[in-house]
Image: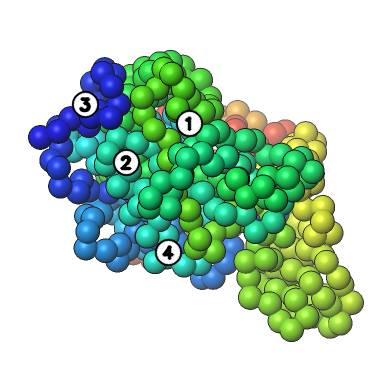
């Protein structure tokens, strides 16, 4: 039995686990954070791009979940991937895993702290059964065309990880792209991999061109392969505050139905840092005896970081146009158009344009200016407009609501509650509500009362009164809710009891 740190010196960690000389199992780790800015208006802060079917009929998250399928006989892949996501995305993440038939272990971050704390929580979760697995960490919002080529690269990286190194997958560049970080190649190894000399942040156009021309730089894909114990040792050595906060948070976590919710107070003590800054930039220095390895990935990789990248990744017609939804082109060239809301989108004589339509917003952008969308979303947020945060239709653990109309001191919603589900027992300080049952049966709690409502029946919830809506039936409950009051924001909710663990 060899120790994990055979090539990592005498670093101390509580995660040091004995493993056999045989190939250890691989554990897929999916980093499913994101703020939903660069693919606005389809992606929103509460519904970022990994939850959207950007390309094909699967969402990016669902496509990522299937990436370790049929991996090959040499390595065992653990049956439960670990998905790390934000609290606001948990229910959509859980539902998409269920739809895909994936029994995932979902780790819910109490707050955003970037990828280094996220991978630390994932390492703790993956090793919680006492096995020192090799983590195969990948973002949830990338596209891969060639899965066999991805598997080949991961297998090469896993050999290095099994020996105690930390490996990343680098993409040989096809152009001087300023939207990616770069990895400078060091000494070449016999299997086609390289030692990592250094990481470089997103460069200016002139510098990116120099990198590509030199042949010594690859794009940083953000995918990492490392033993759980090695990662925990490295994060403890280089970023002890992150390590200690994550360990305390995980030790105080609540676990229910495969969902791990770390202790919020402990986790929020962690600094925010990326894997690159927190650990990878230290590798190869005198204070680290762990090797940093970069393995080539030539699998049609794209981070889909802009609408232009989506256009490039899609199939196009003879004029270079790509479309999603109800779209017609007439005399258009090199145009990407997406109809999200179901309306017919017609592009006549357009060239090098991005046109994206949703229920509540329309984006028209020159393809050469798509990186400016992030700044646009910041302006929308600054103006406190709802289009930056969520779509008109918002999914909840009990079903969904669709904001049909709103105006001064009123808002109308269509609410659908799934069979057996119920909303939290709650109260509002600033609004009253009228409920009209369209279909199904509603069980209503209003103050000390509890009663049933059938189709075409209604009730009134006064301001400040505790209330709850439940569906005791076997078909979806559909109601129309009319809110009236001085303030109608979603943060005007005081929850007293919630089966889904939400607070506030």
Nearest to N terminus: mark 3 or mark 2 = 3
Counting other residues with Cα less than 10 Å from the Cα at mark 2, is it few (<14), some (14-19), or many (20 or more)?
many
Label 3 to label 2: alpha-carbon separation: 15 Å
Does 157 appear above or below 252?
below
Residue 279: give x, y in percent of width and height: 46, 27
Question: Can you say whether 90 is above or below 247 in the image?
Answer: below
Could you tell me which secondary element the residue under label 3 belongs to?
loop
Label 1–label 2 contact, CB within 8 A: no
Question: Of label 1 and label 2, which has the lower sequence position?
Answer: 2
Label 1: which secondary element: helix
| Quarter occupied by residue 333 | bottom right
Image point 89% across, 77% down: which residue?
349
Residue carrying label 1: 280
Front residue of 26 and 373: 26
| Residue topped by disc 2 | 161
| 3D distance between C-alphas at marks 1 and 2 | 14 Å
Front one among 194 and 324 = 194
Numbered tag placed on residue 149 in the rendering: 4
């Amino acid at each position: 039995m060899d120790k994990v740190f055979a090539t990592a010196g005498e670093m101390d960690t509580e995660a040091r686990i004995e493993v056999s000389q045989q190939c250890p199992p691989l554990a897929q780790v999916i980093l499913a954070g994101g703020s939903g800015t660069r693919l606005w208006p389809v992606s929103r802060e509460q519904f970022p791009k990994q939850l959207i079917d950007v390309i094909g009929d699967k969402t990016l998250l669902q496509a990522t979940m299937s990436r370790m399928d049929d991996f090959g006989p040499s390595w065992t892949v653990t049956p439960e991937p670990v998905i790390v996501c934000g609290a606001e995305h948990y229910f959509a993440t859980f539902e998409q895993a269920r739809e895909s038939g994936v029994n995932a272990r979902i780790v819910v971050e109490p707050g955003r702290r970037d990828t280094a704390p996220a991978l630390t929580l994932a390492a703790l979760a993956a090793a919680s059964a006492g096995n020192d697995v090799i983590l195969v960490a990948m973002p949830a919002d990338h596209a891969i065309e060639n899965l066999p080529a991805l598997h080949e690269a991961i297998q090469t990286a896993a050999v290095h990880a099994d020996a105690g190194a930390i490996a990343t997958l680098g993409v040989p560049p096809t152009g001087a792209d300023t939207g990616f970080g770069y990895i400078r190649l060091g000494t070449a190894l016999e299997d086609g991999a390289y030692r990592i000399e250094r990481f470089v942040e997103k460069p200016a156009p002139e510098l990116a061109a120099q990198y590509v021309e030199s042949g010594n730089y690859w794009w940083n894909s953000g995918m990492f392969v490392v033993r759980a114990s090695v990662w925990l040792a490295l994060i403890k050595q280089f970023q002890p505050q992150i390590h200690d906060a994550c360990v305390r948070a995980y030790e105080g976590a609540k676990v229910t139905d495969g969902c791990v919710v770390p202790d919020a107070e402990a986790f929020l003590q962690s600094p925010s840092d990326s894997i690159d800054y927190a650990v990878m930039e230290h590798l190869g220095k005198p204070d680290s005896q762990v090797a940093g390895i970069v393995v080539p990935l030539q699998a049609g990789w794209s981070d889909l970081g802009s609408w232009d990248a989506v256009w490039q990744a899609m199939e196009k017609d003879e004029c270079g146009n790509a479309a999603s939804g109800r779209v017609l082109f007439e005399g258009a060239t090199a145009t990407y158009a997406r109809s999200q809301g179901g309306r017919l989108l017609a592009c006549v004589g357009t060239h090098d344009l991005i046109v994206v339509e949703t229920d509540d917003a329309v984006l028209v952008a020159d393809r050469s200016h798509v990186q400016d969308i992030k700044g646009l979303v910041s302006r929308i947020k600054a103006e406190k407009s709802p289009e930056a945060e969520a779509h008109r239709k918002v999914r909840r653990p009990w079903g969904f609501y669709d904001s049909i109309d709103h105006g001064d001191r009123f808002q109308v919603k269509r609410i659908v509650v799934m069979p057996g589900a119920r909303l939290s027992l709650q109260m509002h300080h600033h609004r009253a509500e009228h409920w009209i049952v369209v279909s199904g049966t509603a069980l209503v709690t209003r103050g000390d009362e509890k009663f049933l409502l059938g189709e075409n029946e209604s009730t009134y919830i006064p301001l400040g009164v505790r209330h709850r809506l439940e569906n005791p039936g076997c078909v979806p409950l559909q109601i129309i809710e009319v809110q009236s009051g001085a303030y109608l924001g979603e943060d005007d909710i005081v929850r007293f009891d919630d089966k889904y663990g939400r607070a506030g």
